[in-house]
Structure formats: C-alpha cells, structure tokens
Amino acid sequence: MTSPLPPGSTLGILGGGQLGRMLSQAASRLGFNVVILDPKENSPAGRVSQGQIIAAYDDPTALSVLGQTCQAVTFEFENVPASSVQALIEGGASVSPGPGALAVAQDRVDEKTFLNGVGATTVDFAPVDGLDDLLAALQRLGSPALLKTRREGYDGKGQIWVRSAAMAADAWHAIGRRPAILEARADFRRELSVIAARGRDGAIAVYPLGENIHADGVLKTTLAPAHVDAGTQARATAIAEAILNGLDYVGVLGVELFDLGPDVDEGARLLVNEIAPRVHNTGHWTQDGCVCDQFEQHIRAIAGWPLGPTTAHFRVEMTNLLGDEVEQWSKLSGKSDARLHLYGKAEARPGRKMGHVNRVKPL
Ligand code: AMP
C-alpha cells in the first residue's frame, strides 16, 4: 500500500469480540466498510459491521474471500495462526501488524529476548522444557518465581508461582508440561501501561501512561493519565518507540510495565511485562480522554492515514464491567461523568467482559 486508503474502502478484522467491535465502530466513523472473520455467529463485532464471514480462523476459503474483499486486514487478538497471516499475505492482502510482530508476541521467550535486545528491560528469565530445566532455573532466579506457558496464556491463565524446589514437579504438571518460561519475581510498586502507535510512514504517537489495577489476574480499572513524573513518562515513551521501531510495526501496540518505584534509578525503574500487538483493554480510557482514541488510531495506521493526536484532555477512570456487573448500566447511565461502552453480549457469564465505563473529570 503506497497511498492512504480512501473512505469507502473495506477493512477486514480477524476476531469478532469487543475489540473488533470498537475497531469496527471507529472504522465506520471514518467511512470505511468492515468485514469480520469469526467462527461464532452473531459476534459483537459482526453485528456492527457490513459483513461477517463465519468460519475458522485458518479456513483457506474464508481467508481467500477476506483477502480479496479487503484492502487492509488486521486482528483483535494475538493468537491468530501464523499460517493464516501467511495465507493472507500470499493472497496479496496487506496485513498489519505484520507476521514478525505476531510471532514475537506469541512466544514469551522470544518476546523477552526481543525486548532486551532493543533495550526494553524485563525481569530475568529462563526457557523451561522439562523438570530439570525448571529446577536449574529456580536455583538461578530464586524463589518464588513465576512459571508461565510460553504460548497462549492471557489474563493470568497458564501461570503458577513456584515457591520452592519441592513445588517444582507439581507446578510443571499444573501448566500441562508444555514449553514454558520461568520468570524472576518483579518487586513492583504498581502496574502501568503505555499505548502507542506507528504509522506506515514510521511516525510514532504515544499516549500518556495509565495505571492498572487487576483482580484475579483480570484488569479491573485503569486510571489515566497516571500520576507519574516526566522522567517516567519519557522512559515509557522511549521503550514504546524502541519496540515499535524494532518490530517495524504498523498499528497500535499495548506495553504492560512494572514500575519498581522511585527508589530505583530512573533508567531502570520500568520493566516490560509483556506486549500486545493490538488495541488493549488498558487503552479504553482514550475513548473519552483523548480526541483520537486507540481504535481510531489503529484504523488510521493500518489505512496509511496520518496518526492522530494523543494528548489527554480529561482524566479517566476506566472500569471493566465483568459478568453481571453489567447490570449496573441503568444506575451508571444516570451519572453525569460516566460514559458507558457496552459490547452487546447476550450472556453475562462470570468474569466475562461485558462492557466498561469511563468516568471523566478535568485534568
Ligand atoms: P501476564 O499474563 O504476564 O500479564 O501476568 C498477569 C499478572 O501477573 C501481571 O499483571 C502481574 O500482576 C503478575 N505478574 C506477571 N509476571 C510477573 C512477574 N515476573 N513478577 C511478578 N508479578 C508478575
């Protein structure tokens, strides 16, 4: 793609959940048509888009139709099969972010190796392919340490704390004896994240940091802009830039950070926990805090448009509505500072992300 895609073009999104839905809504506002690929009928994104292909993510016919219909293709989750992206590209589709970024984000060992290579420091870690590896890594990294599957973990799933060598065998069993990573424990004061974007021309735009509060491994609240000093924001921006450039990235990226606190030297204070090669739950605050939110930003980037401004005009407290918390919609709808974002999911299963609310106040 050499020139910006004009309104009226069609964009494809792999994944029909809430992130796909909000991407589709942003694309629609800019005059694009959107086609969703998702195996489930009636998906949250499919229902606000021009069309949905109901097929598996690796269905060759579906990928071929998507590639031929759409002038640019993206995704809302990082576990898209690499073979699907390859098939789309071989069919002539423009897919962003590209396969290199996906591959790095899909494997925790590759991800940490890449991050350290571009100067974005992480906790110390070791690959683990068996119980002997785990015991050796535990000796080197100390306990407690966190054992995570290399692939396909999210929201705290597929990970277990190993508190002593005596626990190692049970832990290895608990994660299914799959290729894993052992991570040293980060002694952090708080969790931050930075949402950033890179355009087709290599321009970069970085939003202010958010502070995140998790419950049971799932994001509960983001407060943004976080109360941080200028040096911490500058360091986070530099980390995001190094990652985006290192991956030759196009689109929005989420970077989860551990803040080790003011006692640690400024340059070493932030560690990267993980990256998400997509729009991110901790970036939902931008919908009501910024002129150009992360969803529009991603659409702009993949369509080859100039990136939008990332300045915050409001302070936002974003709270996820999980499971039957969505019933609060009626009370929240009457609050003068609250903006509701509901995903149109029929069934409020416990812990399921049903919507979120942004409560805004002046900076
Ligand atoms: P993750 O799935 O990697 O995002 O991890 C989920 C949560 O576990 C993070 O948000 C942290 O609260 C915690 N966590 C992950 N890795 C570490 C670590 N190396 N040290 C301490 N806490 C961690």
Image (spheres, rainbow, N blue to C red):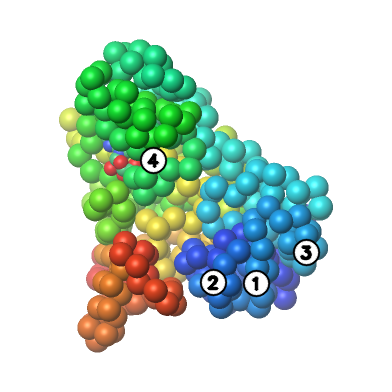
Q: Quadrant of ligand 1?
A: top left
Q: Name the mark nearer the viewer: 1 or 4.
A: 4
Q: Position of residue 176 (x, y in %)?
A: 42, 34
Q: Position of residue 20 (x, y in %)?
A: 54, 65
Separation (CA) of disc 1 from disc 3: 11 Å
Numbered label attached to residue 52? 1
First reached walking from the N terminus: tag 1 or tag 3:
1
Where disc 1 sits, the SS reads: strand
First reached walking from the N terminus: tag 1 or tag 4:
1
Dot 4 alpha-carbon crowd within 10 angstroms: few under 14, some 14 to 19, many 20 or more: some
First reached walking from the N terminus: tag 1 or tag 2:
2
Separation (CA) of disc 4 from disc 2: 26 Å
Where disc 4 sits, the SS reads: loop
Label 4 belongs to which residue?
158
Separation (CA) of disc 3 from disc 2: 19 Å
Residue drawn at 75 percent across, 52 percent down: 88
Q: Nearer the viewer, residue 266 or 347?
A: 347
Separation (CA) of disc 1 from disc 4: 31 Å
As shown in the figure, which amino acid type bears the numbered disc 2? Ser
As shown in the figure, which amino acid type bears the numbered disc 4? Gly
* Circles 1 and 2 in contact, beta carbons < 8 Å: yes
With 226 as the anchor, is 179 left or right in this view? Answer: right
Label 2 belongs to which residue?
43
Whether label 4 lies within 8 Å of ligand 1 gets the answer yes
Q: Give the quarter of the figure containing the N terminus.
A: bottom right
Q: Give the quarter of the figure containing the C terminus.
A: bottom left
